[in-house]
Image (cartoon, rainbow, N blue to C red):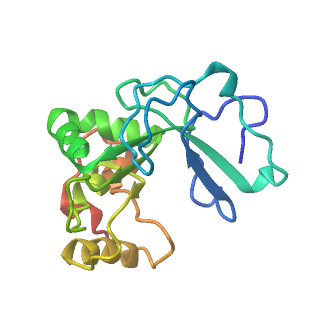
């Protein structure tokens, strides 16, 4: 799903994204300063202007493209196809500093959170703070099935294993208050 002429003003709903592939990636950088494969920290290097074009695909009606940006440069006014990757440490820090700002950003943009790189034992972080803030993609270490993985699996089951976790009703309704853990469990 690529906007034809005008940029999208809000994220597509899950039903609008049915039967579509979500492509999420970084823009090609003008100069690569070092090899650091697989790392998803926020890059401070700017994208090369000549590489900022979206490649045309044969099956464009099946693709929704999201471009990864640094959250330090991201604003709520950015296009909805801008995305940020946040380590568990950043989610926690942003949650402590400004929960409302993080929730406002996730209401308009796709955000992924992931375990910090210091987890040498492949343990998992508690996904609740990310889910509560409205983060759409919470990456966990699948090779370690622990209570945090159980918690995440339980949240998917509550929604009928349909492929996504519902945002807390407080965020869906936009009431402006920060949700709590209990707000994720709806009956």
Q: Nearer the viewer, residue 4 or 92?
A: 92
As drawn, is 11 to the left or to the right of 62? left
Q: Residue at x 71, y 35 (%)?
A: 54
Name the spot of residue 8 as percent of width and height, x first. Answer: 64, 35
Q: In the displayed structure, does residue 3 sit left or right of residue 173?
A: right
Q: Residue 180, position in %: x, y?
A: 19, 55
Q: Position of residue 159 (x, y in %)?
A: 42, 73
In the image, is 174 to the left or to the right of 144?
A: right
In the image, residue 18 sits, relative to residue 132, either above or below, namely: below
Residue at 61% across / 54% down in the picture?
A: 22
> Residue at image x 37%, y 60%?
139
Which residue occupies the extreme top position in the image?
Answer: 49
- Residue 151 against residue 1 in the figure, above or below: below
Residue 181 position, x and y percent, is 20, 60
Q: Residue furthest right?
A: 58
Outermost residue on the left side: it is 96
Q: Is residue 73 visible?
A: yes
């Amino acid at each position: 799903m690529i906007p034809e002429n005008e940029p999208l003003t809000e994220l597509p709903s899950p039903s609008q994204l049915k039967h579509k592939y979500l492509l999420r990636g970084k823009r090609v950088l003008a100069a690569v300063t070092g090899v650091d494969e697989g790392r998803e920290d926020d890059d401070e290097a700017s994208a090369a202007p000549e590489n900022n074009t979206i490649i045309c695909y044969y099956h464009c009606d099946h693709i929704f493209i999201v471009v990864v940006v640094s959250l330090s440069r991201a604003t709520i006014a950015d296009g909805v196809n801008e995305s940020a990757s946040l380590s568990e440490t950043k989610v926690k820090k942003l949650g402590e500093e400004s929960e409302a700002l993080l929730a406002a950003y996730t209401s308009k943009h796709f955000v992924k959170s992931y375990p910090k790189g210091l987890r040498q034992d492949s343990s998992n972080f508690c996904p609740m703070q990310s889910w509560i803030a409205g983060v759409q993609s919470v990456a966990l270490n699948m090779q370690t099935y622990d209570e945090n993985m159980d918690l995440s699996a339980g949240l998917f089951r509550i929604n009928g294993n349909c492929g996504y976790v519902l945002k807390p009703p407080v965020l869906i309704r936009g009431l402006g208050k920060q949700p709590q853990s209990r707000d994720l469990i709806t009956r």
